[in-house]
Image (cartoon, rainbow, N blue to C red):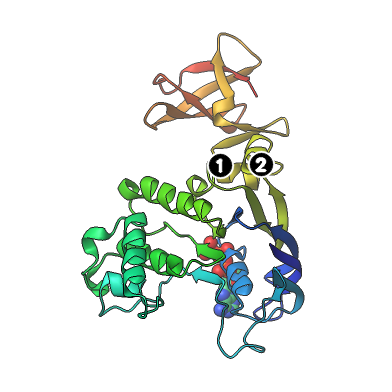
Amino acid sequence: MLNVKHLTFSYAKTPVLKDLSFKVQQGEHLAVIGESGSGKSTLLKVLYGEYDVNFGNIYWKDTEILGPKHNLVIGYDFMKYVAQEFDLMPFTSVEENIGKFLSNFFPKEKKERTAELLEVVELTAFSKTKVKTLSGGQKQRVALARALAKQPEIILLDEPFSHIDNFKKQTLRRNVFKYLKSKNITCIVATHDKNDILGFADNIIVLNNNQIEAYDTPEALYKTPKTPLIASFFDEFNVIDNQIVYAHQLKVVEASDLKATIITSYFKGNFYLVEADLNGEKVFFESLILLQKNQNIYLKIEL
Ligand SMILES: Nc1ncnc2c1ncn2[C@@H]1O[C@H](COP(=O)(O)OP(=O)(O)OP(=O)(O)O)[C@@H](O)[C@H]1O
């Protein structure tokens, strides 16, 4: 278990992380979300031991994670960290990069392990390709595979699929998260993408104003978002009568007290996201049919 107690950290005078406490169980998938600059990457780096904390402690089981003041070499064998900027060996092949930390004394095992990981990140066809000739997304996949090579107990992933195109993203995400669960590897993922979370994460930490604004399951946070910040992470939403109402919870009905005028519609695949004027305020709702500009409609909240 990872146990973070009263963690406070600052680069300069003002803290970026203020008094954070949380636990992550073995095999758990924890997502960290928050606006840009809220400290997600910083938290992962501090958990990895890249910086010394100002106050508080971090334990993985019985080992205290300590920063550079205490360790000549940053990091621990049981923990891997995949940063947003990946530090690969450009002039060597994909398979050599993945196998870099695997022992040459066991060539058969090394080969099998590398082949298994190439499959997880769907790069088998590129095993002999030099990393410098790969795209950003392919490099990100090599970095992921390399972090998994020595089977860490805990892995910290910073925006792990940010460079990967939409065609590959869905399957790759499923492969990687399924693999981590099957090996009981704890993972902490900093992300901007709700698709990295829904269906995968066990718990979410929301960082805001240097603190943990919320900690709960994805389902609880999605269904009852306590703040607009949390709702905005998941979907388009409105605040009507001080209540957070997702766009899909606002329905067009024959008659109601909520009379609105259509401003514009955005095609979203299996529905239109409609922007309308409700008593001088903009509201968003979903419609299966295309509604005309300036058309008057009535809306009802259905939570
Ligand atoms: N090396 C550094 N030195 C000084 N300040 C830093 C450093 N790295 C980050 N910061 C500051 O710390 C704060 C948190 O940054 P961090 O990168 O952790 O946020 P983030 O939530 O990961 O953002 P993003 O979603 O944009 O990646 C920001 O105000 C940033 O400017």
Q: Position of residue 80 (x, y in %)?
A: 52, 70
Evaluate whether residue 132 shows in this view.
yes
Instruction: Give the left or right position of residue 87, taking residue 223 as reference.
Output: left
Q: Position of residue 212 (x, y in %)?
A: 72, 57
Q: Find the residue positioned furthest to the top.
A: 254
Element carrying mark 1: helix
141, above or below 69, in the image = above
Mark 2 and mark 1: Cα distance apart in space: 9 Å
Q: Relative to the observer, which residue lies in front, 271 or 43?
A: 43
Instruction: Give the left or right position of residue 177, taking residue 96 as reference.
Output: right
Q: Which quadrant of the view contains residue 48?
A: bottom right
Q: Quadrant of the N terminus?
A: bottom right
Instruction: Give the left or right position of residue 73, taking residue 256 as reference.
Output: left
User: Residue placed at 72% from the left, 53% from the top?
Assistant: 213
188, above or below 253, in the image = below
Evaluate whether residue 192 shows in this view.
no
Q: Are marks 2 and 1 in contact (CB under 8 Å)?
A: yes
* Residue linked to disc 1: 234
Q: Earlier in the sequence, mark 2 or mark 1?
A: 2
158, above or below 29, in the image = below
